[in-house]
Image (cartoon, rainbow, N blue to C red):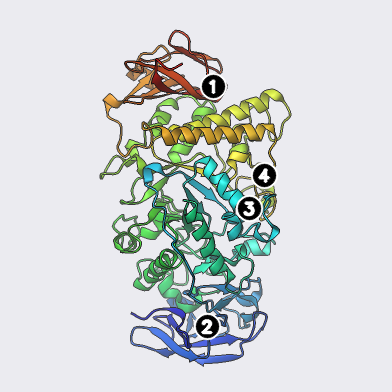
Amino acid sequence: MQRLGAHWDGEATTFALASVHAESVELCLFAHRDAPREMQRLPLVRGPDGCFVARVSGVGPGQLYGYRVHGPWAPERGLRFNGQKLLVDPWARALTGAVRWHESLRGDSPLDSAPYVPRSLVVDPRFDWGDDRAPAVPWQDTVLYEVHVKGMTRLHPELPEAERGRYLGLAAPPIVEHLRALGVTTLSLLPVQHSAPDAHVAKLGLANYWGYGTLAYFAPDARFASADTGEQVSEFREMVRRLHHAGLEVLIDVVYNHTPEGGADGPTYSLRGVDNATFYRLDPERPAEYEDWSGCGNTLDLRQPRTRQLALDSLRHWVSELHVDGFRFDLAPALARDPLAFDAGAAFLKELVADPVLGGVKLVAEPWDASPDGYQLGAFPEPFREWNDRFRDAARRFWRGDAGTHSELATRLAGSQDVFGRGGRSPLSSVNFVTCHDGFTLEDLVSYAHKHNDANGEENRDGAHESWSHGWGAEGPSRDPRVLRLRERAKRNLITTLAFAQGVPMLSHGDELGRTQAGNNNAYCHDDPLTWIDWTLDERRSEFLEFVRTAFALRRVSPALARERFFTEREVTWLRPDGQPLSPDDWRDPERRAFGLHVHGPEPALLLVNASTRGVSFQLPDPGAGARWRALLGSACKVPLALRRGRARVAAHACLWLGAERSDLP
């Protein structure tokens, strides 16, 4: 099969582009990035496999190029060719320059779009990886940390200016030390494939900060590099190499459900002009319109072999050439609709899992998309792990005091067997989280009852309308000591729940430092201090940071947690405060807000939770012969904590984590 993209062999570069429906393709070579017009156009020769190819001598790394693809303009047949559009190579290994919004980007415009689109870049494939090895952290030991490259590092006071907001900054010693002290094993990077802003964001003068609008699936985003003339590739590789050396894995968030070209009236950057009818899902009754399972105007058609090749080739590239350790798939059900309903046996998922390069890396699905049947939590095949929003909502609702939520929380603490208990899956199929990039930060979750997204330019209509948040007596910033005390306790409850639960925990970057977005729960379009981490530590922030570190240190050394199989009835007991097991009536009681989880075994663990407005005294269960309970972590108290006559008092809106130790210890 023809290798697609631009590949330098030391003497010449071979350019290859696939298009089933194109009539001809021209390669456009540019003298420099600001040149509004190409210096040369060269025809590509069509082969029998639908690939257009040319080998050009004397052209090597650093050469800027693009394509003009010719064919009929017939939207009613799904064909949108326009030779006036300069197109990004879908297989480009790097891009230089940025999209600048202009009327010429419209697909039907007779104007030349070349001055307004990035150039594709021929890159040098060589890199000295040294003795780089993947950390290969087992899932039962994994602690995920979702992180934005720029947001994490832009304001860090110990980083040199040249590394702030950059790939190399994320691998700098102060950041690595912070992550290791948290107990993080695996970074989950928000999109780092080269992105472009959606048209409406560009017109508002805002940014596509999160990066969920991939323009080039093989290319590291130049936003996070010192320059965009190839440095983005070498600096991304160096970041991965350094993080691996520190024992940290790197997953990247990938967006194969849609592109920034949007709907029928959107711009033409790349795939729409290369072969619209192949790369996108078109309405079979009206091919001028798009099937939109992403909510962003279009959906990639992974039923098509060429589109699957684009996705799988790019994934293999990130593993083989850039050494990433896995992927989180955005809106993953959209990748497996064949023809319309979600199919766990769809071609893309089957080929992905069976691939000799990709089958052994970590795979995480966001198990919902924007279609009517888009919610598919628990439906993905092994070896996928899935974001578990039911854990998120159960933890939030229980700890803000919602009635009738204790049973749901118990199910989530035990690993969500109701969701993942079929098909040989395990608690480790569940990626547990209480916050992520999409929604409130942890600080805002306990500081705002309502979203405040006015700065997004959509009159506060965007973002989730129900976040199960609570301001604890005030809306937004407060100096009231009681409000602040309750907010800190609420954050500690949520972190303890996350650390103690069965499954794979995921932290959102900066939550451990009190990161706030001023109540904005959809800050995708802000690349400024609103979304960057403030590393300033006052006493309150320092204490919470130490609490988070302690919680995940306890998880790391507790054999009762992160199990590879679900509990049996003999391995766990759910307790009332009087020490008796919860009865069926207790489980149905909507007013029950205090209970205990006793995990049996050689080194038992005990979690006591109390979401009521009053303190509760718990009778502690027998920890086993020759052992006694010891308080390890409390959201409303200092440890060690005196436990008298086998009882422990848990304050209102609080929890307590206990472990067993030999009774002959001092």
Distance from disc 3 to disc 4, alpha carbons, whole Å, reads: 9 Å
Which amino acid, mark 2? Tyr
Between disc 3 and disc 4, whose residue precedes? 3
Q: Residues within 10 Å of mark 1 (few under 14, many from 20)?
A: few
Q: Residues within 10 Å of mark 4 (few under 14, many from 20)?
A: some
Which amino acid, mark 3? Thr
Please tell me whether mark 1 or mark 2 is closer to you in this view: 1
Distance from disc 1 to disc 2, alpha carbons, whole Å, reads: 65 Å
Q: Secondary structure at mark 3?
A: helix
Where is mark 4, residue-wise?
535
Q: Residues within 10 Å of mark 3 (few under 14, many from 20)?
A: many
On residue 639, the disc is 1
Please tell me whether mark 4 or mark 2 is closer to you in this view: 4
| Up/down of 488 relative to 212, above or below | above
**Which quadrant, please, contains the N terminus?**
bottom left
Where is mark 3, residue-wise?
153
